[in-house]
Image: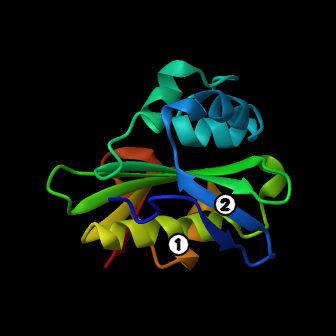
Amino acid sequence: MSMIAAETTVVTRDSVHLAVRPAEPRDEAALEDFFDNVSDDDRRFRFFSAQAHVGHDQIAPLVEVDHWQTENFLAFDTANGALVATAMLACDTRMEVGEIAVSVRADYKGRGVGWAMLDVLGGAAKERGLKQVIAIEDRDNHAAIELERERGFEPRPFNDDHGLVVLTKTF
């Protein structure tokens, strides 16, 4: 059972009210449109490639999840219904470590949406009994790295890839 089994409302520090719920296969078109509304850099940071459009092959793993080992939360602005963020938690088979990824629509950046989605992911990780969560970031993604550090994540190098950094939060 997911921490958010149905829709719940989350309020950001800038008073943006978000309806947050788990993604479902019917959300594929909305996610495709969503990723057309994130910056080119954010799309590159999320998928580690410079593609201009995110299609079925990248979106299917975001909507076809088991809702326990893997969950993808969608956040909709309650004022206008727009999909403004997606936040994924993918756990290892032992349910000890989860990898997270958050994307926020370009026009909603700086409004506390990323913080709120990290809190949703943290709650889901704790509910699952994870010992830690990690985020793998491109070293150029300064905004995400700083946000995660502010939320208690510790950075370290990613193996031998000097272009990436792993940020870890232990519970």
Residue 62 visible (yes or no): yes
Q: Amino acid at mark 2?
A: Ala
Q: CA distance from mark 2 to mark 1?
A: 14 Å
Residue that sits furthest to the left in the current view: 94
Which sits in the foreground, 138 or 65? 65
Picture coordinates of residue 43, whole percent (x, y): 64, 37
Picture coordinates of residue 14, whole percent (x, y): 81, 75
Say left or right for 75 vs 13. Answer: left
Among the 4 quarters of the image, the one containing residue 161: top left
Residue bearing mark 2: 19
Residue bearing mark 1: 119
The structure residue drawn at horizontal position 64% and vertical position 23%, both measured from the top left corner, is 51
Q: Is residue 59 above or below residue 145?
A: above
Give the mark toward the camera: 2 or 1. 2
Residue 154 visible (yes or no): no
Which sits in the foreground, 22 or 52? 22
Instruction: Say which quadrant the C terminus sits in.
Output: bottom left
What label does residue 61 carry, if any?
none
Picture coordinates of residue 11, whole percent (x, y): 70, 74
Residue that sits furthest to the front in the current view: 6
Among the 4 quarters of the image, the one containing residue 34: top right
Sequence order check: which comes first, mark 2 or mark 1? 2
Q: In what element is the residue under mark 1?
A: helix
Q: Residues within 10 Å of mark 2 (few under 14, many from 20)?
A: many
Q: Residues within 10 Å of mark 1 (few under 14, many from 20)?
A: some
Q: In what element is the residue under mark 2?
A: strand
Instruction: Say which quadrant the N terminus sits in.
Output: bottom left
Contact, CB < 8 Å: mark 2 with mark 1?
Answer: no
The structure residue drawn at horizontal position 44% and vertical position 55%, both measured from the top left corner, is 100
Q: Amino acid at mark 1?
A: Asp
Among the 4 quarters of the image, the one containing residue 52: top right
